[in-house]
Image (cartoon, grey):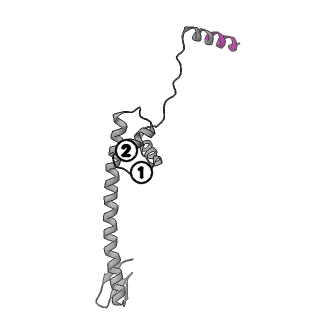
Amino acid sequence: MVSQFGSLGYTIMGKTADLKVVQKTIIDTLHKEKVKWKEKVWKKKMHNQRENCSLERLVKQNRLKNLGELHKEWTEAGVKVSRATTYRRVKDFGYSCHIPLVKPLLNHRHRQRRLTWAKEKKK
């Protein structure tokens, strides 16, 4: 909605409207609140960027930490977020929060048995 002060009142979308003093006050108050709202959004965005940097720093310090440990350290640093939010943010950074499975290495005997099995199945 485009509004400007005119000699007869407010100009709304190219038409002149005679507004009462109460209506003008409401419009002015809403406009001022909109500016304050934009400032709040900007401050929140900057705050989130700082929080993200602190989480990324925690992840880079020790890449072997699991999600529970990261979430605990991040909340101890003063950030109030859920575990799901922590997971999403870490995933957005390109890291994964899981404990890798450890597989036993194959010894010489295992390799030999696999090779003979594969040769049998080839035919």
| Residue at 48% from the left image edge and 35% from the top image edge | 98
Of labels 2 and 1, earlier in sequence is 2
Q: Position of residue 118 (x, y in %)?
A: 65, 13
Q: Position of residue 59 (x, y in %)?
A: 37, 38
The three-letter amino acid code for the residue at tag 2 is: Trp
Where, by quadrant of the figure, is residue 23 drawn?
bottom left
Q: Considering only vertical position in the picture, is 122 above or below 69?
A: above
Disc 2 to disc 1: CB gap under 8 Å: yes
The three-letter amino acid code for the residue at tag 1 is: Val
Q: Is residue 55 left or right of residue 120?
A: left
Q: Which residues are magenta?
A: 115-123
Marks counted in the figure total: 2
Q: Position of residue 32 (x, y in %)?
A: 31, 74
Using the image, tell me which numbered label, if any, was put on residue 81: 1
Q: Residues within 10 Å of mark 1 (few under 14, many from 20)?
A: few
Work out how far the residue at label 2 is from the one at label 1, CA to CA, in angstroms.
Answer: 9 Å
Using the image, tell me which numbered label, if any, was put on residue 74: 2
Q: Residues within 10 Å of mark 2 (few under 14, many from 20)?
A: some
Q: Nearer the viewer, residue 41 or 17?
A: 41
| Element assignment for label 1 | loop
Q: Nearer the viewer, residue 112 or 70?
A: 70
Q: Considering only vertical position in the picture, is 40 above or below 55?
A: below
| Residue at 52% from the left image edge and 16% from the top image edge | 105
| Element assignment for label 2 | helix
